[in-house]
Image: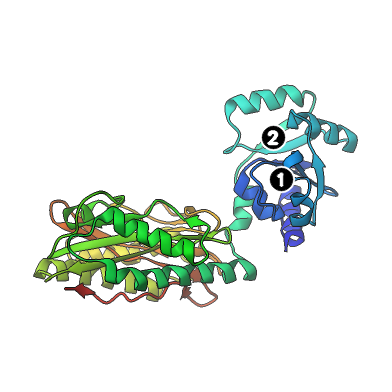
Amino acid sequence: MHQARLDRLRVVMEQQGLQALLITNGVNRQYMTGFTGSSGYVLVTAAKAYLLTDFRYMTQAPQQAAAYEVVEHAPKAMETVRDLLVKLGIAKIGFEQTDLTYGAYLSTAETLKGIELAATGGLVEQLRLVKDVSELAVMREAAELADRTFTHILPFLKPGAKESEIALEIEFFMRKNGAASTSFETIVASGERSALPHGKASERILQTNEFVKMDYGAYYKSYCSDITRTVVLGKPTDKHREIYSIVLEAQMTALERIKPGMTGQQADAVARDVIKRYGYGGFFGHGTGHGLGMEIHEAPRLSTQGDVVLMPGMTVTVEPGIYLPGFGGVRIEDDIVITETGNERLTHASKDLIVLD
């Protein structure tokens, strides 16, 4: 698996005229090597692949990164990078421009004096866009855990409970059932707070006759799931039912129509046009979805700015919403993988309007 990723990266490097690439981003490092330690650098050339790390990981790294030669780097890691480049006769090296700070760049340039530094953008991230079979297997498990969490939390949604208590129970259940952590800070927003798209759990007490919106995910075996469900406590009003049904229609329409060959912008328009048709376009201010995988927000974006063409193996969320200030809001979100002919849902928790007495 990691050798295949190395082979794909080398093809991209050759296309860009790079003799070597230095990977400093931690997620990219893990993706390329399998190494889960907190510190290290990856140096890839046409013929060599090195994982540089420190003393703490000199037992762990060789076990996890079998496709790489593991090197214990000097106290100043770039000195070891320099020595390897000189040994290999490398005169030009690419670096990850979105990961290296300006200060780190200056320091690296000083240490690697005489070696040309070439800024690169998204080389490994482009490889990560399309998930392989092993990645999709883990993401299905992460999604299934999110589904089970929704079933688990429903009995806890009662008037008098605090949003923060609900969030804690969600997180506890996911951790107890295999998650290393949450994919992001859990959102539980009730009543008028449900109109906040990213209303993190507060000390607000759940009351009757209001929405409770929950957006959470499991960080499981290094991959993320992301799901949103909105329920009603007590008796829903006509307005509750109206906006819920519109969001559900928008989300289901998108799930039916999203397919390979679409741009993220076109996929976004499928859901957005439904909400606009009902006159609520001004109350849906975020994108329809985003890529996810080892990180909770990855490419591609399903938004008005999404220009990436969807391809089989890409994993994205589909999460339209309507948010009415002073009243409340609804978001319904599933994770999907793009297939050869359309898409496959990874999350399957009920999306019927659940009313809890």
> Three-letter amino acid code at disc 1?
Gln
C-beta proximity under 8 Å, tags 2 and 1: no
Res. 30 mark: none
Residue 326 in view here: yes
Q: Nearer the viewer, mark 2 or mark 1?
A: 2
> Three-letter amino acid code at disc 2?
Ala
Res. 118 mark: 2
Q: As displayed, is residue 149 above or below residue 83?
A: below
Assess disc 2: are there few (<14), some (14-19) or many (≥20) residues with their C-alpha within 10 Å of its C-alpha.
some
Q: Residue at x 24, y 64 (%)?
A: 275
Q: Residue at x 9, y 69 (%)?
A: 237
Q: Residue at x 24, y 55 (%)?
A: 162
**Measured Cα–Cα span from mark 2 to mark 1:** 10 Å
Assess disc 1: are there few (<14), some (14-19) or many (≥20) residues with their C-alpha within 10 Å of its C-alpha.
few
Q: Quadrant of residue 128?
A: bottom right
Q: Report which residue position mark 1 lands on.
A: 16
Q: Quadrant of residue 105?
A: top right
SS of the residue at dot 2?
Answer: strand
| Coordinates of residue 96 in the picture (x, y in percent) | 63, 39
The C terminus - image quarter:
bottom left
Residue nearer the viewer, 283 or 161: 161
